[in-house]
Image (spheres, rainbow, N blue to C red):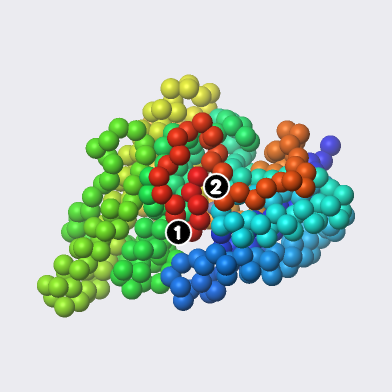
Amino acid sequence: MTDPLILGLESSCDDSAAALTRGRDVLASVVKGQGALHAAYGGVVPEIAARAHAERLDLCVEEALAEAGVTLRAVDAIAVTAGPGLIGGVLSGVMLAKGLAAGLGKPLVGVNHLAGHALTPRLTDGLAFPYLMLLVSGGHCQFLTVRGPQDFSRLGGTIDDAPGEAFDKTARLLGLPQPGGPSVEAEALKGDERRFRFPRPLLDRPGCDLSFSGLKTALLRQRDQIVAAQGGLTRQDRADLCAGFQAAVRDVLAEKARRAISLYMDEAPASPALAVAGGVAANRALRGALEALCAETGLRFTAPPLALCTDNAAMIAYAGGELFAAGVTHDMDLAARPRWPLDRTAAPLVGSGKKGAKA
Ligand code: KG4
Ligand code: ZN
């Protein structure tokens, strides 16, 4: 029997996206980013994002159908991000999905955006449950044990900012273009990570919770000291600041990953694996550190290709397919949720990211 054809919709932050999947086959994945609309404001403006999603999501669906060469009638179920995220955007997606489901008489499946990220290694690499996941993006940062499409345990997470936010802020403070991650990484390649020693927050505390807001402040102070002393930053100063900052993020994430691995291994999984997802997982210094850690501790390391690491609808369609196969569907009461922790038993983390509510 062939797998059902799933249409997925994503609109929880600043990417409008639609995709069609059949099992692990991605037939089409369309992402329309909104970077240019928000550029002048230094962050995502929720009202602008919501309006843009409402205007673009149906175009994404049309393009995805054309790319896959299928009609709406052929779709077996509609999967949609129902949270967590910026509520106006999530509502745009949920309303469109409900309209399509009602109009076509097809089942509706509400998907947790974080579950979409967390299940992506199954889509890209066929990874079997359970596995350890580091979800690290502009809006999220957490370690999860993934046991099933609805079975997640959070081992730790950020108590304030997400690392992607810190990369973006660093770029802004140093006059580098957005998104900050790639520009800071490129500068760091030319810099000396030992010149400025930035703090490694929370390493002195047990467990695998993380914090990144102090690191941003330390960078700001260091920059201001240099400017006060010599009237401005040289190219080398900028590169060294980026290298020092990136090294601190890498070291903190690697050390916390080591602790998460040790907690996860207490479960004695049959084939131990660590997977990463989210935009920051594109960072080569971080990937390198995690790969080395996995080699040392005997875990398989999986990092999905970048297009499926960052926000997209293929992950939502795929996760929706897993839920649908497990018998999960929703009716017209499906709610759009600004907050929606994957692990409902874990204590809530402090703080709320600029790019959307954390969970
Ligand atoms: O997953 P994503 O596309 O969106 C959400 O935040 O949900 O992640 C975007 C974040 C941005 O903060 C961006 O600066 C960061 O990922 N990023 C990187 C790199 N590429 C993107 N951070 C560090 N190094 C990179 N190469
Ligand atoms: Zn995301």
Which of the two residues, 210 or 251, is positioned nearer the viewer here?
Answer: 210
Q: Position of residue 156 (x, y in %)?
A: 41, 37
Question: For the point 54% across and 34% down, which residue is it?
Answer: 344
Local SS, label 2: loop
Above or below, 220 relative to 41: above
Outermost left residue = 229
Along the horizontal axis of the image, is 215 left or right of 61? left
Residue 135 place in picture, x, y as percent: 48, 45
Q: Residue at x 70, y 54 (%)?
A: 94
Where 1 falls versus 13 (above or below)? Answer: above
Give the mark nearest the N terminus, 2 or 1: 2
Residues under labels 2 and 1: Cα distance?
14 Å
Q: Residue at x 55, y 64 (%)?
A: 46
Which residue is labeled 1 in the image? 354
Residue occupying the point 43% across, 70% down: 42
Quickly name the residue at label 2: 339
Question: Does any atom of ligand 2 lie closer than 8 Å to the CB of label 2?
Answer: no
Neighbour tally class for label 2: few under 14, some 14-19, many 20 plus, Cα within 10 Å: some
Left or right placement of residue 316 versus residue 72 in this view: left
Q: Position of residue 340 (x, y in %)?
A: 56, 44
Asked if one can make out residue 240 in the rendered structure from this viewpoint, the answer is no
- Front residue (pair 23, 298): 23
Q: What type is the residue that disc 1 sits on? A: Lys
Can residue 123 be seen in the rendering of this structure? yes
Please state which of residues 101 and 123 is positioned toward the viewer in this rendering: 101
106 sits left or right of 256 in the view = right
Find numbered disc 1 in the image and state the secondary structure of the residue it sits on.
Answer: loop
Label 1 environment density (alpha carbons within 10 Å; few <14, some 14–19, many ≥20): some
Quadrant including the N terminus: top right
The number of discs equals 2
Q: Which mark is residue 15?
A: none
